[in-house]
Image (cartoon, grey):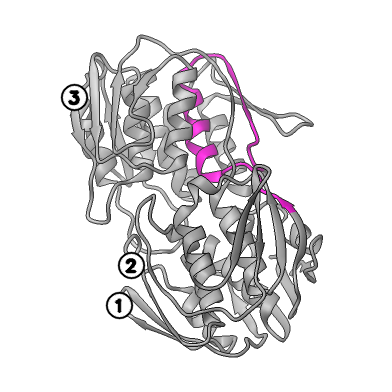
């Protein structure tokens, strides 16, 4: 099992190109199921989550190939299996995304309850409720979601709001299923994340009729069939936010290429409020920090609010602020497994239910730590860059799920990270 040895503190300076979005690539890969034939997706990052999802599609009968340019092709001409097996789906949350498209195309599907990061309860009841409103008959059997629609799906008005706001993967599932349903479907309280907009734009390019893209109300006019597509996935706003935080936590300057600031206004606003400069530059931005980090409060919210996937990384940054900060987690209230690890590095964090109170310290100190999930892993890497001494991070396979060759990319701009096996 690989570990990172990170020597700090360092100052990052240089240019980094942001890869395509993991969270957009996965449901878009699932969308290829809807159209028999070969679809090609561009800018799909080479991550372990992408590989696992490729395994899942292969198990259904699809053929997956990646060319020298990094383009990912999915040939879904033949679907010979409609079961998402536990051995694969348990390894990633996004495996649930095959539920909607398989149901729409094949009229039946069985998918294991999904796995993924240990960040608290993430039920799939909203997915099931939405698909039932489209006419599917669904029951749970031996840990599998079993859905059938032998006579096809029928459009309806569907509300997808939940206790913590809209559901991204639930919206993706219902949206994909609705494209082949008879009649009109209206999804109210749909997720507005750019990753859902990417998926909807891809579906429209496949021949779907979706309007309201980017809003909480999606309107879908069902069509009889979709066709294969060539589509480029947008840049990863979470990866961009992580590198922004890396520049800030090391008092450095990074130019981020392929970054859409218009999709990151909550993040940019927070950075500027704590003393970090963010300037747009030729399809990207330049992030600089020269002075002290100012304390601040923030609450994670569904898009366009502050993303939960950047909560841990920004907690590292606020750990070095001069004063007290408060972070409130409204999406996954248990997503604080990194708090204890950061405290091992001399941070001063106190968890009170869904809130963490941060008393800023002058410096972090290296320590052996353990990654618990994807974004917590990124936070520990950022802490290691700023901490004095050698930080050793166990279980870095978590970070490989969402950041392609992160140690090489950070080393290219001044980091000192060594990946070791065992």
Q: Is residue 116 above or below residue 419?
A: above
Do callouts 2 and 1 mark residues in contact (Cβ within 8 Å)? Answer: yes
Examine the rendered structure and indicate whether residue 170 appears above or below residue 115: above
The region drawn magenta spans 16-45
Quarter where residue 275 is shown: bottom right
Using the rendered image of the protein, determine whether residue 139 is visible from the camera's viewpoint. no
- The x, y position of residue 278, in whole percent, is 60, 60
Residue at 26 percent across and 21 percent down: it is 149
Which residue is depicted at the point 61% across and 46% down?
A: 259
* Mark 2 surroundings within 10 Å by alpha-carbon count, few (fewer than 14), some (14 through 19), many (20 or more): some
Residue 106 among magenta residues: no
Q: Earlier in the sequence, mark 1 or mark 3?
A: 3
Residue 35 among those drawn in magenta: yes
Q: Find disc 1 in the rendering and name its residue.
A: 353
Query: Which percent across, then down, holds residue 144?
Result: 33, 42
From mark 3 to mark 2, how far is it between C-alphas? 32 Å
Which of the two discs, 2 and 1, labels the residue nearer the N terminus? Answer: 2
Say which mark, if any, is on residue 156. 3
Numbered mark located on residue 333 in the image = 2
């Amino acid at each position: 099992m690989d570990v990172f040895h990170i020597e700090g503190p360092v100052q990052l300076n240089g240019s980094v190109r942001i890869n395509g979005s993991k969270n957009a690539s996965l449901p878009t890969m699932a969308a290829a199921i809807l159209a028999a034939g070969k679809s090609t997706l561009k800018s799909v990052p080479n991550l372990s989550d992408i590989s696992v999802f490729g395994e899942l599609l292969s198990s259904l009968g699809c053929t997956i190939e990646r060319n020298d340019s990094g383009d990912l092709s999915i040939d879904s001409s033949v679907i010979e299996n409609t079961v998402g097996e536990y051995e694969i789906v348990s390894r990633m949350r996004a495996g649930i995304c095959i539920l909607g498209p398989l149901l729409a195309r094949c009229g039946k599907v069985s998918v294991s309850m999904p796995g993924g990061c240990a960040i608290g309860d993430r039920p799939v009841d909203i997915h099931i409720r939405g698909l039932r409103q489209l006419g599917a008959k669904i029951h749970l059997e031996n840990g599998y979601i079993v859905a059938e629609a032998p006579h096809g799906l029928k459009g309806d008005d569907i509300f997808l709001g939940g206790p913590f706001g809209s559901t991204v993967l639930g919206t993706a599932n219902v949206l994909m299923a609705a494209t082949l349903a008879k009649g009109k479907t209206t999804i109210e309280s749909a997720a507005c994340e750019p990753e859902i907009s990417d998926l909807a734009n891809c579906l429209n390019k496949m021949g779907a009729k979706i309007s309201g893209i980017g809003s909480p109300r999606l309107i879908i006019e069902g069509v009889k069939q979709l066709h294969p597509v060539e589509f480029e996935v947008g840049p990863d706003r979470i990866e961009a936010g992580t590198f922004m935080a890396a520049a800030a936590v090391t008092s450095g300057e990074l130019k981020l290429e392929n970054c859409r600031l218009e999709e990151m206004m909550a993040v940019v606003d927070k950075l500027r409020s704590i003393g970090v400069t963010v300037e747009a530059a030729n399809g990207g931005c330049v992030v600089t920090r020269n002075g002290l980090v100012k304390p601040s409060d923030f609450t994670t919210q569904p898009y366009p609010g502050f993303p939960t996937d950047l909560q841990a990384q920004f907690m590292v940054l606020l750990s070095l602020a001069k004063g007290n900060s408060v972070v409130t987690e409204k999406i996954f209230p248990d997503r604080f497994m990194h708090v204890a690890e950061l405290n091992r590095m001399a941070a001063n964090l106190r968890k009170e239910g869904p809130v963490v109170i941060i008393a800023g310290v002058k410096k972090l100190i290296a320590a052996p730590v353990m990654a618990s999930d994807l974004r917590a892993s990124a936070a520990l890497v950022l802490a290691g860059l700023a901490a004095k001494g050698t930080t050793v991070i166990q279980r870095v396979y978590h970070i490989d799920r969402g950041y392609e060759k992160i140690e090489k990319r950070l080393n290219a701009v001044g980091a000192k990270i060594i990946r070791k096996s065992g």
